[in-house]
Amino acid sequence: MTDVADTPLPSQLWKQLSAERRLAAAEAFWRDAHAVAEQGELLGTIAQRIKFRIKSVVAMPVEKKARQVVALPTVSEAVAARLLVVYHVAHQRPMMGRFLDALEIPHEDGMIADEELAAPPPQERLAAAAKTLASAFPAEDVSLYLSTLIWQDPETWGGLAGLPQVNTQT
């Protein structure tokens, strides 16, 4: 099995996304009530970059703030990770649900019903679930999703590292 460290970092995954996907993720990010800390980080970065006061950046419409995020040359790992998570929650729920169905994990519209799983799914089941996704969704979507899971919770999803479905270009 490949080490989790071989999976691209969230910031690397973010850079590999098309501008269209980054924009969709950034718009979802600014609408996410759970991204307050990461939003605060980006407000300061954007304000500094465009030489605006933070108060002015806060007042910008979501679409304009999203375009500013896409224009940033880099984002921190925490911000990139949050951008990837909100992208999936906003735009990839069918894939998330299919993955959890394949693992027989109870969920509500792609979101795990219990706070924590009793134990990480076995390697064989993870491999079978990844294969199920690969047969139903574009390879780059599957790779991005599985890589995001690995970085979001390596203890639970680390068994995905090294699977061929993770190692495709996004």
Image (tube, rainbow, N blue to C red):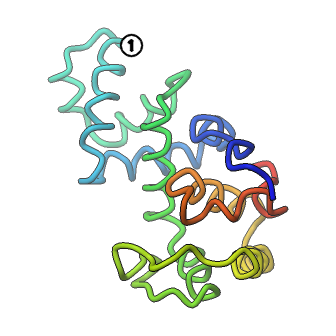
Q: Position of residue 151 (x, y in %)?
A: 56, 50
Q: Name which residue lies at 56% across and 81% down.
A: 100
Q: Name which residue lies at 56% across and 56% down.
A: 154
Q: With 152 as the anchor, is 145 left or right in this view? A: right
Q: Residues within 10 Å of mark 1 (few under 14, many from 20)?
A: few
Helix, strand or loop status at disc 1: helix
Tell which of 23 and 33 is nearer to you: 33
Number of residue marks = 1
Residue 134, compared with residue 132, is above or below; it is above
Residue 51, compared with residue 105, is above or below; it is above
Q: Find the residue positioned furthest to the right.
A: 164
Judging by the rendered image, the residue that carries numbered circle 1 is: 49
Q: Position of residue 144 (x, y in %)?
A: 66, 55
Residue 69, compared with residue 99, is above or below; it is above
Q: With 105 as the anchor, is 2 left or right in this view? A: right
**Quadrant of res 117:** bottom left
Check disc 1 and give the amino acid type. Answer: Arg
Where's the N terminus, which quadrant?
Answer: bottom right
Q: With 93 as the anchor, is 159 left or right in this view? A: right
Tell which of 70 and 136 is nearer to you: 136
Q: Find the residue positioned furthest to the top.
A: 51
Q: Position of residue 128 (x, y in %)?
A: 76, 81
Q: Name which residue lies at 43% across and 63% down.
A: 90
Tell which of 139 and 162 is nearer to you: 162
Q: Name which residue lies at 57% across and 41% down.
A: 10
Q: Position of residue 153 (x, y in %)?
A: 51, 57
Q: With 9 as the anchor, is 39 left or right in this view? A: left
Residue 79, compared with residue 148, is above or below; it is above
